Amino acid sequence: MRTLIAAGFAALLFAASGADAQQRQEAPYDLWCRDVATGEGLVILCMARTRQQCLESRTSPGESCYLNPRYDPRFRRQ
């Protein structure tokens, strides 16, 4: 009986963790962008999954981070 209860509990934990993994999707690698000033003008770099990663990758305090227009719902075409 104990073995059956333990097996049922293990199956329940495994099923719950599988569902959680499906619900959690990893953010795209280019979700956050920043503008980088060059001698020729501005270059848009979209290479961060999180805002924190974007902020840490800045090379000057004047650079700001923003959501990639590709994923930002305000810029979606109807």
Image: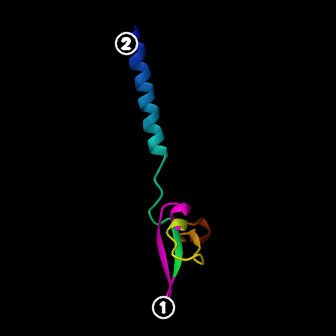
User: Quick one: label 1, few (<14), some, or many (20+) residues within 10 Å?
Assistant: few
Give above or below for 31 relative to 36: above
Of tags 1 and 2, which is closer to the observer?
A: 1
Which image quadrant for residue 13? top left
The residue range painted magenta reads 37-54
Give me the C-alpha separation between circle 1 and circle 2. Answer: 70 Å
Residue shown at 49% from the left, 45% from the top: 23
Q: Secondary structure under badge 1?
A: loop
Q: Position of residue 9 (x, y in %)?
A: 44, 21
Could you tell me the amino acid type at mark 2?
A: Thr
Verify whether residue 16 appears in magenta.
Answer: no
Q: Which mark is residue 39?
A: 1
Verify whether residue 38 appears in magenta.
Answer: yes
Q: Which mark is residue 13?
A: none
Q: Name the residue that disc number 2 marks.
A: 3
Q: Earlier in the sequence, mark 1 or mark 2?
A: 2
Left or right of 29: which side holds 65? right
